Amino acid sequence: MGDVLSNLALAAICLLAALIFLLSLAEAALLGANRQLIRRHAQAGDRRAQAIETLLSQGDYITALIASINAAVISVSTLSTLLVWHRVGQGAPWLGEVVHLATIAALVALAELTPKTYGAVYADEIALAAAPAVAWLTKVLGRPVAALTGLGDALLSLGHMPPLHKRHVVTEEDIQAVADLGEEEGLVEPEEGR
C-alpha cells in the first residue's frame, strides 16, 4: 500500500464506520417504532410510514441491515489490519493486536451502542426518516437476504422452531399475560381479562 492507498483505506474505514452508525440507528428505530403511530401516518398517506409497514410485514429488512452491518465491520477490521501492517510492518505484531482491539472497541461504542440507544429513544422520527433508504437496501439485497433467511429457517427447523415469517409478533399467551397484569393492577375487570 502506498501513501495514497493508505489514505484511501483510512477514508474507507471512516466511511464504513459512519455507515455502521447509520445502519445501527435505522435498525434500532425500526424495531422500536410505535406501530400504532406508524399505522396512523400510513393511513393518512405518509409514504414513509407505508414503507415502514411494508418492511415490517415482510421482515427481510432486519436481515438486510444485519448483513450490511456485519459486512461493514469485517471490511473495517480488514482495512485496519492492512493499514497497520503497511505502516509498521509485521515486526510489531502486538501493535496490530492493540489496533485491532481498539478498532473493535471504537466500533462497538461509537457505531453500535450509541446509535442503537439514540435510535431507540427517537424511534418514531428516525424510522420515518430511514424507511426509504432501508426499503432500497432491502430491495438491492433481496436475493442474498432470501438465501440467508432460507438458511436461517433451515437451521431453526433443526431445533423444531417455526420459520421467522411464521412466528407471531404477539402471541395469545402475551395477550393473556397483559390481561392478567391488568386484572392485578385493577385496570381490567376479571371478566374482561378472559
Image (cartoon, rainbow, N blue to C red):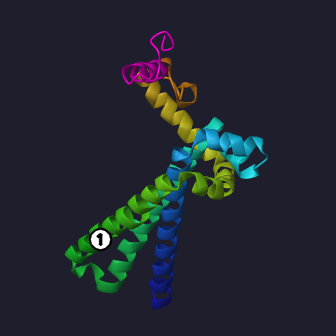
Q: Secondary structure at mark 1?
A: helix
Vertical comparison of 57 with 123: above or below: above
* Residue 149 colored in magenta in the image: no
Question: 95 or 45, which is in the foreground?
Answer: 45
Question: 147 or 174, which is in the foreground?
Answer: 174
The residue at which mark 1 appears reads as 102
Q: Amino acid at mark 1?
A: Ala
From the viewer's perspective, is 77 left or right of 54? Answer: left
In the image, farthest residue toward the right: 45
Question: 86 or 191, which is in the foreground?
Answer: 191
From the viewer's perspective, is 90 left or right of 60? Answer: left
Count of numbered badges drawn on the protein: 1
Magenta range? 173-194
Q: Which residue is painted at 47% across and 69% down in the image? A: 17
Where is residue 35? Give x, y as percent.
60, 40
Q: Which residue is painted at 53% across and 63% down in the image? A: 22
Where is residue 33? Give x, y as percent.
56, 46
The quadrant in which the N terminus is found is bottom left
In this orientation, does residue 74 appear? no
Where is residue 179? Give x, y as percent.
46, 20
* Residue 191 colored in magenta in the image: yes
Where is residue 163? Give x, y as percent.
52, 27
In this orientation, does residue 43 appear? yes
Vertical comparison of 52 with 150: above or below: below
Characterize the local packing of mark 1: few (<14), some (14-19) or many (20 or more) Cα atoms within 10 angstroms: few
Q: Which residue is painted at 39% across and 59% down in the image? A: 113
Vertical comparison of 123 with 143: above or below: below
Q: Which residue is painted at 79% across and 46% down in the image? A: 45
In the image, farthest residue toward the bottom: 3
